[in-house]
Each structure stands twice: as C-alpha cells, then as structure tokens.
Image (tube, coloured by chain):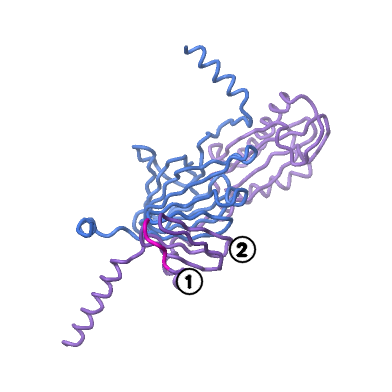
Chain colours: A purple, B blue
Amino acid sequence: MKNSNFIIAVLLLAVTAGCATKPQASFYLVPDPEGHVGEVTVSNQAASVTLNKANETVAAPREDKAFSESRVATSEEIQGKFADALAIVPPPPRGFSIYFDSGSSNVNAESKPILEQVLAETRQRDSHDISLNGHTDRTGEADTNMKLSLDRANAVKALLVEQGIKPEYLTIEYYGESKPVVPTEDNVDEPKNRRVEVVVR
Amino acid sequence: MMGKSRFVLIVAMSMCLPVLAESQDNLVGSITDIKGTIHLLRGEDEVKAEKGTRLYTSDVIRTEEGGGVGIVLRDDTTLSLGPSSELKMSEFKFKPDEGILGMTLSIAKGTLVYISGQIAKLSPGSAQIETPAGVAAVRGTELLVEVPAPKKAKHSEKTK
C-alpha cells in the first residue's frame, strides 16, 4: 500500500512538473492529401526553425524561449492529438468550367454533362457554398462583355436553382474579358475563354 | 462634400475590376461542417454559425468541448478545428491578378488542421499561422498546430 502511494505521488509530481514546462504551441508538418510534404518555418522572438520532413514536429514553450529540438513524431502521437480535428477536415474544393456559345449565355451542348457533374458534386457533399465566376472572350466591346459575363453566371445560377440548389448558396462574380484562360488579341473568338468557372466547396 | 465623396466613390467603383456582384471584399470563406456546439464572434456580436455560413476578416470561431468545425477559404485553403479551440481570421488578402496575397490565422487554443490553398502556393511564406508562442510561415503543405488550453487562472497568476 505504502509503495503504491509513493508511486502515485511520484507520478503526480512528474505530471505536475510536466505541466510547468508544457509547450504553448506544437507544430507538426504532415504530408498533404496528395502525399506532398512542403516546408514550414516557425519563428518567435528567440529563434526560428524550419520543418521539411514528414511528421516532423517542434514545440515552442513561450514566445521568448527557443524551440525544442525538432523530431519526427509517430502517427499514434499525431492521431492522439489531432484525431478530432482530422475527422472534420473538409474535402478539397472542386472546380468545373462550363462553356458557352459565342456571344451568348447559352451553355454549349458539350458542357451540359459538366453541369450534371456540378449538381452531383453539390449534392454529394451537400455544399452550401458554390462560386460562379463569369468570363467572355474578346469578341465585341469590353462593356458588353462585362454584362455578358454576368449573364452567363446568372444563366448557370438559374439552371442550378431549377434543379433545387438554394440561391443563397450561390455566389456570383463576373470579370468580362479581363481574365482569359487563353490570352488573345482583341476581337479573337476563343471558345476556352467563354466560360463560367464553378467552385463547389 | 457628400456629393464629391459620392462621385469619388462611383469613379472608384467604376474603375474597380473585377466587379463583385454579391460577394464582399472582406469575405474569407465559409463553414462546411459543424460538430457539437460552436460559436462565431463578429466584433461584439455572436452570429449564428451553421453549414454554409460565410466568414469575414476578423471573425473568431470557437468550438466547445466535443465540438469541431470544417472551413474552406476563398483560396481553397481547407481548415478544421478540434474541440475546445479558438481561431481568428486575422487577415485574408486574395487578389492573385494584382499580386496581393496574404493570410494570417491566429489560434488561441486547441487544435488546428491547415491544408494550404493558393495563397501559400502562389506566394510561399505569406500564409501565416500565429500562436501564443510563435508564428508558422507555410510554404505549400499540410500543418497541424496544437495550443494546449491555458492552465487554470489561479495557477498562472501565481507563476507570474
């Protein structure tokens, strides 16, 4: 009995001592969803350290104290700390391009299936945040194209709303001919630039 | 005076490209998922937070015990917070055409998962995560940050 009390006391001391030097922040560099490991530089008033290895970690005790030596953490340690946060990471946003007939806000025939994909993606992740960015090529006047790019975004909006997507989930921006995918001279007919870029989040 | 400033405003707006129809200039992102109870603080006010709620610069998100939240930013950065966490959207500038790129997220406590979007990719190092003990400058990657809850108030008073 005495022995076990002693052990508990020692453990408590160890825990308390541990708390006193508990880091105020820990950083873990992990592979991104594509498996790529980037680089992070952590700095404070005392020092600066760069992490560039998978699962490399460093702890900072205070704003004005040097970092711990960096080390590679086990996946158990990472899961232990971050399982809850990792479980709620959103799927990466997905982008689509919908193309239009020249000078018009009619979705071209080849893009109809893309619209179906947008709907499927929206429903699958129950997205409440979809961006529609309208663009044109450089045929016609810039002013007219500004309006046409808005009309195109609104046309896609109408098609999605028709299929049951709530209008408040959709955000429209429009850029006229100012953001071509394929840069051209003025008055060049370029099908790839006549588009609405959709991002489903 | 009013007339003049309004005129300046109209000129400034007409010069402003791209034209933004419904979005606002300080839009940062939106909430994609919520677990348990979370709070969204905007200035002095608490705003209702649900799936799809748009987030703006300076918003603070707090999760309670057992809570969690998933967030996607306008530059495709994806974030999540675990339980008992607090994150501020301190700064967000995403105008790639004009070369204006920058983001600062400040975590006061809890756990954060950060997966780089376009800002960190287009302008390495200009995406930053602030903590009470140091700042992380990210160059295109996934980063996990933990800021343990502060010790009990009485205890920290004594140690000061």
Tag 2: amino acid? His
Q: Is residue A153 magenta?
A: no
Q: Residue furthest front?
A: A46
Q: Residue furthest right?
A: A188
Q: What element carries label 1?
A: strand
Q: Does residue A83 appear in the picture of this structure?
A: no
In space, the residues marked 2 and 1 are separated at their CA atoms by 19 Å
In this image, A60 relative to B142: left or right? left
Q: Does residue B22 appear in the picture of this structure?
A: yes
- Quadrant of res A129: top right
Report the residue at 48% width, 55% height from top.
Answer: B136
- Label 2 or label 1, whichever lies nearer to me, is 1
In this image, A101 relative to A71: left or right? right
Residue A200 is situated, as x and y percent measured from the top left of the image, at: 60, 47
Residue B148 is situated, as x and y percent measured from the top left of the image, at: 35, 61
Residue corresponding to mark 1: A71
Mark 2 chain: A
Counting other residues with Cα less than 10 Å from the Cα at mark 2, is it few (<14), some (14-19), or many (20 or more)? Answer: few
Report the residue at 73% width, 24% height from top.
Answer: A144
Residue A107 is situated, as x and y percent measured from the top left of the image, at: 74, 38
Q: Which of B156 and A121 is in front in this view?
A: B156
Report the residue at 27% width, 75% height from top.
Answer: A14
Report the residue at 35% width, 40% height from top.
Answer: B46
Q: Is mark 2 on a helix, strand or loop?
A: loop
B1 w.r.t. A143: above or below: above
Tag 1: amino acid? Arg
Quadrant, the N terminus of chain A: bottom left
Residue corresponding to mark 2: A36
Predominant SS along the magenta part: loop
The magenta stretch is A63-68
- Quadrant of res A158: top right
Tell me which numbered mark, 2 or 1, is placed earlier along the sequence. 2
